[in-house]
Image: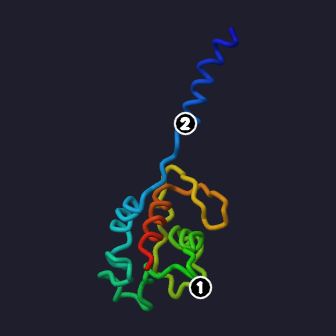
Amino acid sequence: MIIRRLIPFAGALALLACTQISMPEPSEGQALFAENCVQCHGTSGKGNGPWAGSFDPAPADLTRLTEDGVFPRARVLSIIDGYDRTGLPGHQMPEFGLLLVGDAVPVDVGDGVLTPTPRPLAALLEYLENIQE
């Protein structure tokens, strides 16, 4: 009797173990960028969007975030979601954390530890890392 109950449970565990979380592609982040960021940062991410002239200083060039060959994943996530704006000139950038909610995906933020991150935020991070010059 107990074995009959365990067989379906074991099958469900095996299926769960085989299911992989799909990580977002840069194209998914590009769509979010087009919806939320181009007005200030421009379609190319260089900080030259239609509203850029309204801000002093101008919005950041998001194609040049890499420092010493390393993309600052944790810092970029913190700025986008509004958690950390330390050292940013002005504070015109809106907080997008509440807009970028969804199922969590594991993201390595640069320290080798996988951090549960809302999928849209992870997608935007992938896109930004992909457009670095």
Q: Residue furthest front?
A: 69
Return the x and y of residue 59 as percentages of the image width and height. Answer: 42, 84
The C terminus lies in quadrant: bottom left
Residue 127 is left or right of residue 3, and the answer is left
Return the x and y of residue 41 as percentages of the image width and height. Answer: 38, 79
Question: Circles 2 and 1: CB distance less than 8 Å?
Answer: no
**Residue positioned 47% across, 67% down in the render:** 96
Q: Circle 2 sits on which residue?
A: 18
Rendering quarter of residue 52: bottom left
Q: Amino acid at mark 2?
A: Cys
Q: Residue furthest left?
A: 50
In the image, 110 versus 40, the foreground residue is: 110
Within-10-Å neighbours for mark 2: few <14, some 14–19, many 20+:
few
Rendering quarter of residue 72: bottom right
**Residue positioned 45% across, 83% down in the render:** 60
**Residue positioned 42% across, 58% down in the render:** 25
**Residue positioned 67% across, 60% down in the render:** 113
Precedes in sequence: disc 2 or disc 1: 2
In the image, 75 versus 8, the foreground residue is: 8
Q: Secondary structure at mark 2?
A: helix
Return the x and y of residue 33 as percentages of the image width and height. Answer: 38, 68
Return the x and y of residue 35 as percentages of the image width and height. Answer: 34, 66
Classify 125 as above or below 6. Answer: below
Q: Circle 1 sits on which residue?
A: 87
Q: Residue furthest right?
A: 2
Rendering quarter of residue 127: bottom left
Q: Amino acid at mark 1?
A: Gly
Q: Secondary structure at mark 1?
A: loop
Within-10-Å neighbours for mark 1: few <14, some 14–19, many 20+:
few
Classify 89 as above or below 109. Answer: below
